[in-house]
Amino acid sequence: MSLPPMTLDELIVYFESVFETCALTKMRLAKLEADGPKSIREVGRLQAMAKLYLDALVQTRDMHEARRRYPSGGA
């Protein structure tokens, strides 16, 4: 099953959710002490990756908005 493409704004919301889910998972793992620091580090790596994607998406959206506002490249 293939999903339709997402808009930049939809992708930003998606990756914000991924980032928050990672944060919540780290807190739960810390409480459970399930494989302790190793599990928390792994989730932290996923969270860092999601943050990189989120930052890139926000920058891309901002770039597109700036191009719409100033099509000739001038401010």
Image: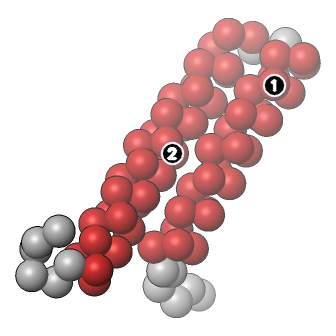
Q: Which residue matches tag 2?
A: 50
Q: Of 75 and 58, which appears nearest the observer?
A: 75
Displayed quadrant of residue 69: bottom left
Question: Mark 2: few, some, or many residues within 10 Å (few <14, many ≥20)?
Answer: many
Residues at circles 1 and 2 in contact by the CB criterion of under 8 Å = no
Q: Which mark is residue 4?
A: none
What is the residue that sits farthest to the right in this orientation? 32
Q: Which mark is residue 27?
A: 1
**Percent of width and height locating residue 62:** 36, 64
Q: Is residue 72 visible?
A: yes
**Percent of width and height locating residue 63:** 28, 66
Residue at (79% x, 35% y) in the render: 24
Indicate the amino acid at tag 1.
Met
Residue at (54% x, 37% y) in the render: 46
Q: Is residue 52 above or below residue 60?
A: above
Displayed quadrant of residue 29: top right
Describe the colour scheme in one phrase. Answer: secondary structure
Query: Which quarter of the rendering shows the N terminus?
Result: bottom right
